[in-house]
Image: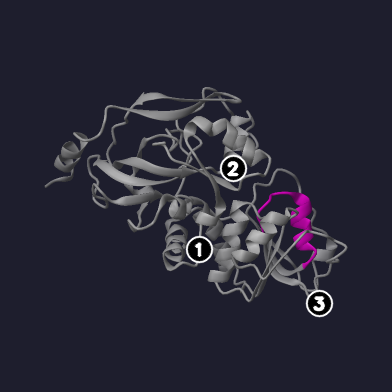
Amino acid sequence: MSATNSSADLNMNVPPRMKLLQIEAPGRAVWKDAPVPVPATGEVLVRILGVTTCPHWDMHIFGGQPMFPGMKLTYPYLPGQPGHEAMGEVVALGAGVTKLQPGDRVVAWRDTGKPRHGFYAQFNHFHEDDLLKVPATLAPAEVASLELAMCVEVSFQQLAALGQPLGRIGLSGLGPAGLVAVQLARAHGATEVIAFDPVAERRLLATTLGAHRALAPDTARWPASRQQDALDVAVDLTGVPAAIEFLMDRTRRCVTLFGVLRDEVRFSSRHLFGPGLILSGYGDHNRAAAETALRFIVSGQLKLKPLITHTFPFTRYAEAVELLRGKQAIKILFDPWL
């Protein structure tokens, strides 16, 4: 049976209408009716089983603020956006699809960055190259945030490309990315993982997920020194200059940046010698990073479910964003069928 015939047969079981979320203005999101999209060439139609918040995206877009410097926002915002951490089931194929079949469980491994409908919906169409097939045994909470894990894995690729063994690694910021980084550091063989965050509850969670130590970023308790007891390498997951400079003053070899940087960071003479410190930027999203993250999920070395603190219907989207903003939630899983 051809892919075209298979798509036509399965479309008989797909309803003509669905629900999706649209942010119509800052502070106002509507869960509304829309037609079910038709997959284009190379795309599949996914029945979404779960999608998780990407907190900074949600807080910025719902709050009327651009996620990146220079980004222009227009409202109503794109339907289904900013949802991009999603998993579901393939229910229809567009022309030319060769890698996926109806019934496959899939997860979005990257946000293409192109203007298009997002995954805050009951159905979405997505190119097959931007999806990974996942075991049917994985629940949405266990795998929907794979795109985040891919993004964090890119920082570990950066360290590897620079020839930097992990050794004693420091991680600044224990939001969702930082909690993923704790587990990836262990999976990649770090000898000691030291995490920094001002929130005690997140430090506790980091230790349950594998951090050897989780500390408040206190300059008095850990004075600046790049010599004795220093970190070997570090990853900043905040984008906050003070947090980055805290790591730079306590790291021997390399600090790599994951968090979105909006202000200048001071690189001074104390970082030039003894040995010279490398300050590394971010790399490119890539499928190999996603496949590595998925392998760690399947093996049990990367657990995404503990990051999910709430499961909501989309009718509670505004409440979810407020929980994220107040640090009362880490990540929220939306079930579009509730």
Q: Quadrant of residue 156?
A: bottom right
Q: Quadrant of residue 36?
A: top left
Q: Residues within 10 Å of mark 2 (few under 14, many from 20)?
A: many
Q: Is residue 120 left or right of residue 132?
A: right
Of marks 2 and 1, which one's residue comes earlier in the chain? 2
Mark drawn on residue 228: 3
Toward the viewer: 162 or 173?
173
Residue on which disc 1 sits: 302
**In contact (CB < 8 Å): disc 3 and disc 1:** no
Mark drawn on residue 55: 2
User: At label 3, which amino acid type do we have?
Assistant: Gln
The residue tagged with tag 1: helix, strand or loop? loop
What range of the chain is rendered magenta? 236-250
- State whether residue 118 is above or below residue 138: above
The residue tagged with tag 3: helix, strand or loop? loop
- The quadrant the C terminus occupies is top left
Reply yes or no: does residue 262 show up in magenta.
Answer: no
Percent from the top left, x then y, of residue 32? 43, 24
